[in-house]
Image: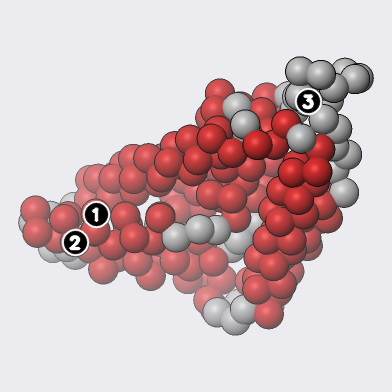
Amino acid sequence: MPLSTWWLFVLMTFVVSATPGPNMLLVMSSSARHGVRSAVVTMAGCMTALLAMMSVSAAGLGALLQAFPTVFDALRLIGAAYLAYLGIKTWRSPVQDQTPGSVGTQAPSATSNALYRQGFLVAASNPKAILFAAAFFPQFINPDLAKFPQFAILLTTFSIIEVSWYFVYALSGKRLSVYLRRAAVMQTFNRLTGGAFVGFAALMAVARE
């Protein structure tokens, strides 16, 4: 793979990964609510799903989904339903003051298993990631050279860039956490993030291949 091709891939992936989406929103939200360490667990869930989806895309599942649009539509609607559920759950999350002078106990933090599972399901809820990998990655692979090493390089590069942006969003969420100690602010944050997840669900539900 020529170095110029790799740099073009880096540039395009940098822009694509920076674009706000359900994964980035979830990482930022996890960091704001539970801290950066918990957000790292969410990141791990997201990346596990993304790497699995891109690997099966390389194995030909992307072409299968394109050949059978009914299967793709079913997966897309299931993913949209999960994002809508997550949005409604976030919107309705109970809140309470966490200022030094507040009365009552702080709500328990989410477990690592729950954070990982949520990250995995949010990332896996969008079957378009499979089609994206099937359409995007081959543009940078030289068919005259061994494909697996090239795919491994591209996947590793994608992972590093994606995780780097996860940390950018996580640190942004950490800075927000200072303001989320008041119940009124947390409720507003919950409704904004919940509404955003429902919005992503709506976009996914009406999207076409």
Q: As drawn, which residue projects farthest toward the right?
A: 104
Asked whether the viewer can see residue 60, the reply is no
Question: Could you say which quadrant of the image residue 87 lies in?
Answer: bottom right
| CA distance for labels 1 and 2 | 5 Å
Instruction: State which quarter of the image contains the N terminus.
Output: bottom left
- Disc on the earlier residue, 2 or 3: 2
> Residue at image x 40%, y 55%?
18
Q: Label 3: few (<14), some or many (≥20) within 10 Å?
A: some
Q: Label 2: few (<14), some or many (≥20) within 10 Å?
A: few
> Residue at image x 55%, y 33%?
174
- The amino acid beneath tag 3 is Gln
Instruction: State which quarter of the image contains the C terminus.
Output: bottom right
What residue would you read off at disc 2?
8
Does residue 49 sit above or below 33 in this rendering?
below
Query: Which numbered marker is on residue 10?
Result: 1
> Residue at image x 24%, y 58%?
11
Query: Which numbered marker is on residue 98?
Result: 3
- The amino acid beneath tag 2 is Leu
- The amino acid beneath tag 1 is Val
Please tell me which residue lies in front, 192 or 18: 192
Q: SS for tag 1?
A: helix
Does residue 68 sit above or below 104 in this rendering?
below
Q: Position of residue 108 (x, y in %)?
A: 81, 22
Please tell me which residue lies in front, 119 or 180: 180
Q: SS for tag 2?
A: helix
Q: Are marks 1 and 2 in contact (CB under 8 Å)?
A: yes
